[in-house]
Amino acid sequence: MLARHIKFGVATLALCATGLVHAGTAMQAHGPEPQRISTHFEVSTRGTTSQRLEREVLQVLETWHHRYMVMFESEPMGPIPVILYPRRTFHGSTGAPHWADGVYDSDGAIHAAIGGVARVGAGLERLLAHELAHAFINQLSGSRAPRWLQEGLAQALADSRPVKPPVHPRVAATRPDVLDYEGTLRFTRHLLSIHATATIRDTLADMGTGRSIDAAFQARLGGTPVELLAAWSAREERLAHQQMMMEPTP
């Protein structure tokens, strides 16, 4: 999840040549927040966790960082702070809504609720990949990508699981910024299905140069977000009508 206000820019830290090191015994001796750092990330915890979990978090993030760097042909300035929380304290500490387990916040950090897990499973990997996608999207667009595109693209890139369409799909929104969470995913996946990922990347880069959202979309995708949403909505309505016509009469 992307926090409402974003400011990107994290001071570069001197890292050990090994790429993954413990941040010293002094911190462990004076506080409950052990840290681990890698080439692109610095992990700290708000609570008790294992060094193995911290290492796995860094390994997963580095894997996704490489994927996104190839995809976006750019990268955020690092290392990116990654803060892991017990689930019971996450929402109170971050202000995230009750349904969110992660947030990329205005401090340029990834905040994630890890619960009581001992290893990085598929769910936590998707969460980390999602929040990391926000860092790349935000960097490339110069913080100008609209929230609906941020969320839709972060979901689409981090989670390849198919979304089951509603029984009778209806798109009531006339602007993409009022789509719900699932709607942004479905609309963004629609854009990705007809345009190469590189085209979406170039659209974000155009925003990063100062071009307006409408101008960037028009130049790269052939229409403004409102126009593209209208075309997608009409398509969804046709599919819904065809589905209804095919259903047996009770």
Image (cartoon, grey):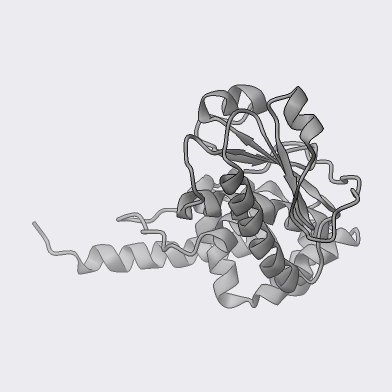
Residue 211 appears anywhere in the view: no
Coordinates of residue 180 in the picture (x, y in percent): 52, 45
For this view, does 51 lie left or right of residue 247?
A: right
For this view, does 173 lie left or right of residue 84?
A: left
Residue at 67 percent across and 56 percent down: it is: 133
Work out which quarter of the rendered image holds the N terminus and state it.
top right
Q: Tag count in the figure?
A: 0
Coordinates of residue 156 in the picture (x, y in percent): 56, 61
Q: Specify the quadrant of the image occupied by residue 65.
A: bottom right
Residue at 73 percent across and 30 percent down: it is: 28
Work out which quarter of the rendered image holds the C terminus and state it.
bottom left
Coordinates of residue 72 in the picture (x, y in percent): 75, 69
Residue situated in front as seen by the camera: 35 or 233: 35
Q: Would you place residue 162 above or below residue 102 in this image?
A: below
Residue situated in front as seen by the camera: 241 or 180: 180
Q: Specify the quadrant of the image occupied by residue 91.
A: top right
Residue at 47 percent across and 50 percent down: it is: 123
For this view, does 154 lie left or right of residue 245?
A: right
Residue 232 appears anywhere in the view: yes
Q: Residue furthest left?
A: 250
Residue at 61 percent across and 28 percent down: it is: 47
Residue situated in front as seen by the camera: 78 or 234: 78
Coordinates of residue 215 in the picture (x, y in percent): 81, 64
